Amino acid sequence: MKKSSNTPDDSAALAAIFLDYVRGPTLQQRFVGLEPDVVAKTFSDVLNNLDGQTALAITPGADIATAALI
């Protein structure tokens, strides 16, 4: 982290990385121009990498059976 952010210590490196992330494009901006199936696949990939409880927390209307599939 220190090397990629060009700072002398970890906390400064983390601050630099965080600020770079915050200043970056939003998800909405990143998805502009993408086909709907690409956006859907991206969200599917993310949800498939979450545990069931977290997936339920961020997908309103989902149920326990759906979470078991995730």
Image: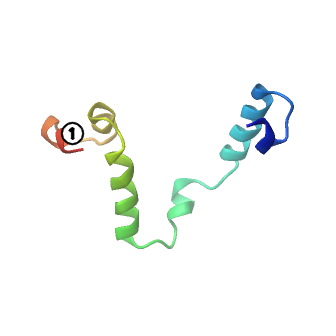
Task: State which quadrant residue 52 falls in.
Answer: top left
Residue 56 sits in which quadrant?
A: top left
> In this orientation, which residue lies closer to the viewer: 28 or 44?
44
User: In the image, what residue occupies the spot 34% across and 69% down?
Assistant: 37
Place of residue 26 in the rendered image (x, y in percent of width and height, measured from the top left): 58, 53
Q: Position of residue 17 (x, y in %)?
A: 71, 40
Q: Which amino acid does the dot numbered 1 rest on? A: Ala
On the rendered image, what quadrant is the N terminus found in?
top right
Q: Nearer the viewer, residue 12 or 31?
A: 12
Quadrant position of the C terminus in the picture: top left
Residue 23 in the image: x percent, y percent? 70, 48
Which residue is depicted at the point 27% across and 41% down?
A: 60
Q: Position of residue 2 (x, y in %)?
A: 78, 36
Q: Which residue is mark 1?
A: 67
Using the image, determine if residue 44 lies above or below residue 19. below
Residue occupying the point 31% across, 34% down:
57
Relative to 17, is 40 on the left or the right? left
Q: Is the residue 64 above or below the residue 49 in the image?
A: above
